[in-house]
């Protein structure tokens, strides 16, 4: 009986070592972004699979995972090697047990793709590539998972984060990890693309343990993108680019429809552009969401030279504050 228990424990430990997952690595040449997103029936998959560096490339390392492929791969990419050269060198250097069960995908600084699914990666295991992406997975319900991911990535317009999420969602809807759901992660990098100073990680969000990890990843992605566009709005206003600031504020509203700050900024920018009707609608939305503290928020935000005219527009103010 003890022997049976030990065998069961060893089998369980071996299963835990397998990062059964589906992921996609990709490059967006238009915006100079590299990214990885991943989902799995594995605790905290984001701490293991995704690796990326702005101007260098992105890597997903999974299955009978050698986590060292992440930092080592980025080191080799930094030296100017192509994705294929890096993959070949890492496989040649790998002296750890179970190399024939590895799965790894790489996109380099120029968008070149390389991928490897070992013959002993747990079934179903495989990968598919497009011009600027590679989708891969193991212990999946079948090849339709990675095929659906590629189609969704290519069919989704807009920025890389949205394309990555669409691909992950499509893989999940196609069956995903055959064992179920637990965690998800997204990492997107771009030179100086993150918040604060000297930060290339525009997105790095992790759902470590959740029965619906993709829904939670979507919630976190909306928050992350809202903060990025809020920061962009402020910077564009600071540089006097009101037209682009308005576009950024509209994206804040898209990602934060139930928060007042985006509506407030967008309303003021609409007013400054001469569209009082749209401005009134946005500012009324902001007032409804902000509650009793809105007037002071409004007056503070309207103190900028660009917006000051609104404070003396009595007809407009009566519509906004009818009491």
Image: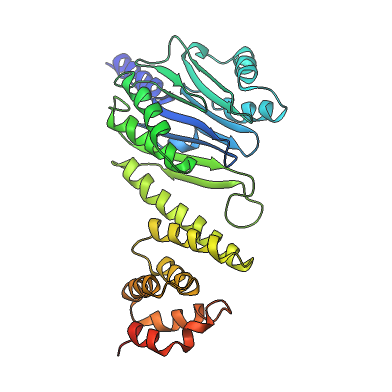
When the figure is inspected, residue 309 is found, relative to residue 73, above or below; the finding is below
Relative to 189, is 176 above or below?
A: above
| Residue, far front | 274
Residue 213: x %, y % from top left: 34, 41
Asked which quadrant contains residue 231, the reply is bottom right
315 or 236, nearer to the observer: 315
Quick check: 47 left or right of 52? left
- Depth order, front residue of 150/224: 150
Residue 12: give x, y in percent of width and height: 35, 23
Quarter location, residue 243? bottom right
Tell me the residue at 42%/31% (across/down).
Answer: 154
Residue at the spot 60% in from the left edge and 40% down from the top edge: 32
Q: Nearer the viewer, residue 114 or 305?
A: 305
Residue 279: percent from the left, percent from the top? Answer: 40, 73
Colour setup of the view: rainbow
**In this picture, is 8 found above or below 219?**
above
Q: Residue furthest right?
A: 79
Question: How many labels, in total?
Answer: 0
Residue beneath the point at 46% across and 37% down:
46
Give percent across and percent down for residue 41. Answer: 34, 31
Q: Quadrant of the N terminus?
A: top left
In terms of depth relative to the viewer, which is nearer, 200 or 255? 255
Q: Residue at x 41, y 90 (%)?
A: 314
Up-down: is 202 above or below 253?
Answer: above
Q: Quadrant of the C terminus?
A: bottom left
């Amino acid at each position: 009986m003890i022997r049976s228990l030990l065998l069961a424990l060893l089998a369980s430990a071996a299963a835990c070592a397998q990062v059964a997952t589906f992921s996609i690595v990709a490059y967006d040449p238009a915006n100079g972004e590299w990214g990885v997103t991943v989902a799995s029936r594995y605790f905290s998959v984001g701490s293991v699979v995704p690796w990326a560096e702005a101007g260098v490339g992105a890597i997903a390392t999974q299955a009978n995972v050698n986590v060292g492929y992440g930092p080592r791969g980025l080191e080799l990419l930094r030296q100017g090697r192509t994705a294929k050269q890096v993959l070949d060198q890492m496989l040649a250097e790998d002296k750890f047990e179970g190399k024939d069960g590895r799965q790894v995908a790489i996109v380099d600084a120029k968008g070149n793709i390389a991928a490897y699914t070992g013959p002993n990666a747990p079934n179903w295991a495989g990968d598919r590539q497009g011009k600027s992406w590679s989708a891969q997975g193991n212990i999946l319900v079948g090849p339709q998972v990675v095929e659906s991911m590629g189609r969704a990535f290519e069919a989704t317009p807009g920025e890389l984060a949205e394309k990555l999420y669409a691909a992950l969602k499509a893989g999940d809807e196609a069956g995903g990890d055959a064992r179920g759901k637990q965690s998800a992660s997204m990492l997107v990098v771009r030179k100086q693309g993150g918040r604060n100073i000297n930060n290339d990680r525009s997105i790095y969000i992790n759902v470590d343990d959740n029965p619906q990890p993709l829904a939670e990843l979507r919630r976190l992605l909306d928050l992350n993108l809202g903060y990025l566009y809020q920061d962009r709005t402020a910077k564009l206003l600071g540089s006097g680019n009101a037209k682009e600031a308005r576009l950024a504020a509209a994206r804040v509203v898209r990602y934060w429809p139930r928060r007042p700050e985006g509506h407030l900024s967008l309303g003021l920018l609409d007013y400054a552009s001469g569209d009082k009707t749209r401005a009134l609608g946005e500012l009324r939305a902001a007032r409804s969401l902000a509650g009793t503290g809105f007037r002071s928020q409004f007056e503070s935000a309207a103190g900028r030279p660009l917006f000051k005219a609104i404070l003396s527009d009595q007809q407009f103010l009566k519509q906004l504050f009818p009491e």
